[in-house]
Structures are given as structure tokens and as C-alpha cells.
Image (cartoon, rainbow, N blue to C red):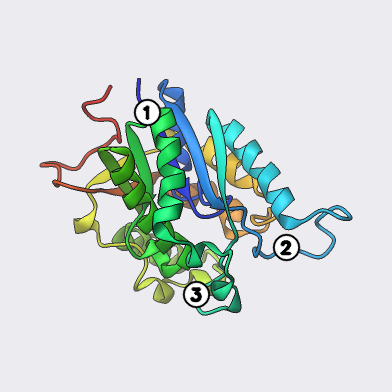
Amino acid sequence: MATLVSFHAHPDDEAIPTGGTLAKAAKDGHRVVLVFATKGEHGEVEDGFLDPGESLAERREQETLRSAEILGASRVEFLGYVDSGMMGTPENDASDSFWQADVEEAATKLAEILREEKADVLTVYDDHGVYGHPDHIQVHRVGVRAADLAGTGRVYESTGNRDALLGGLLEARDMGVEMPGDLDPDAFADFGVTDAEITTEIDVTDFLDVKRASMRAHASQISEASFFLSIPDEFFARGFGQEWYIRRGDRPAERETSLFDGLE
């Protein structure tokens, strides 16, 4: 069996794009390790949601541990940086933000975990952070460098299939499914990559209940009324039943269906 280290920017990032992959890997007997750059300190939370004196970072750490348990992860680590907020916000400029982190320094921290775990596979994000979030872009930069430092030979960039997503959203909209403004198909022109750029597509339809439970664990960010939890099961399966990656290095001759081909 292999060891998979999945590197993410904030709590809940493990659930939405990679939750099915992680749950499937754990069920198949692989060791799954989650590493987060930040604790998502600048996420939005409803007034009164947190307990008196509780910080959002504290709550999100606990939510992450619950999500990890649901997914079957064996270890969770935080690198200790602060959430950088959305691109162009003042939080980008904070000296302790992940966006301002020295890439070599951050990569050295991650590489230490990769070496400890003797990681066979590392997941990061694509080079534009899937949708341009500064911390996601930095995960790509730091993760790629960490793999070099640790000698982790197999690196996958988690991404979105723009063609599949747009097709599904348009179909859902035409069928009368109500979508919030930020999920309008027109807003996804720069999201992820085209289908032709994807090397690896993992069918996670057998793990949709686990994936949704992982999302639900992040209640401070993903409410029951959110798109992710309120969308009908049929469309959740259409939108989240596949997870997509780009394998770094030589492109496989055929589209892969596992992160572990040749390692199992």
C-alpha cells in the first residue's frame, strides 16, 4: 500500500475537490495524510455561530479533525501560516499570511512531512489555484518545490474540469435548479482547465455520502442551506461524482483512473 499526502490551503478544501479521492484511497488501504497551510482564519461565519471566546481558527481546526475522521485520514498537520483572504484584499499583505510566505521556507516544512511519511504521492492544486485564490496558488508553488526537496516523484495537481462543470451548471439551470449568483455558469470562464488538459479522472460516485459528510463537518463554512448541501442528490452526483487531476511530468498515454497506478 502507498502513502498519499494531500496539501491544502484551508480547512474544507480537502472535502470539496478531493474528498472522494481521499476516502477511496483510505478505504483501499492506503495511508492518507492531510496538510493545511492555514486554519482559514478569514473565512466568513455567521454572528453567534462561535462559542463565547472561541476563534474561527479554533473551530475550523476541530471541523478539520472531524472531516479527516470521516474521510479516513490518519494524520492532520497545519504548517502555521495565516489565511491570506481573497486576491486583492488587505489580508494578502500581512507578513504572516501564506501568500507572503517564503516559498523555500514553507516547502522545507512540507518536505519534512513528506520525508517522515515516505510519501509516494502528493496532491497540490494547478498553477492558478483552480480559481485564482492566492493561497491556492501558493499551495501549488510550495507543494511542487517540497516534492523536489523530498524526492516525492508523483505529484498530482487537483483541478476542475471546466467543460464538465459548465455543461452541468447549464443543464441544472435549464431544469430550474436555483443557483446563487457566484455559481452562475458565466462566472466559470477561468475556472480549472479544459477537459483535454486533464490526465487523471477518479470516479468517486461510491463515496458521495462520505464526501458530503466531510463537507457537512465544516459547518462554519458550509451550511445546510449552501449549494453543496442543498442541491438535489442527482445534481450533486453529476457535479461531484468525478474528481480531476493533472499529473506532473510525462503525460500518461491514457487517462488515469487512480493516483496509485503502478504503486498498488
Q: Is residue 195 left or right of residue 143?
A: left
Confirm whether residue 74 shows in the render. Answer: yes
Q: Amino acid at mark 2?
A: Val
Q: Secondary structure at mark 2?
A: loop
Q: CA distance from mark 3 to mark 1?
A: 34 Å
Q: Nearer the viewer, residue 259 or 244?
A: 259
Can you say which quadrant of the picture contains the C terminus?
top left
Point 68% across, 55% down: residue:
223
- Label 3 environment density (alpha carbons within 10 Å; few <14, some 14–19, many ≥20): few
Count of numbered circles on the image? 3
Q: Quadrant of residue 186?
A: bottom left
Q: Residue 35, percent across and down? A: 50, 43
Callouts 3 and 2 close, C-beta under 8 Å: no
For disc 1, the marked residue is 118
Can you say which quadrant of the picture contains the N terminus?
top left
Callouts 3 and 1 close, C-beta under 8 Å: no
Q: Which mark is residue 87?
A: 3
Q: Is residue 57 left or right of residue 90?
A: right
Q: Amino acid at mark 1?
A: Lys
For disc 2, the marked residue is 45
- Label 2 environment density (alpha carbons within 10 Å; few <14, some 14–19, many ≥20): some
Q: Residue 90, percent across and down? A: 59, 78
Q: Nearer the viewer, residue 260 or 135?
A: 135
Q: Amino acid at mark 3?
A: Met
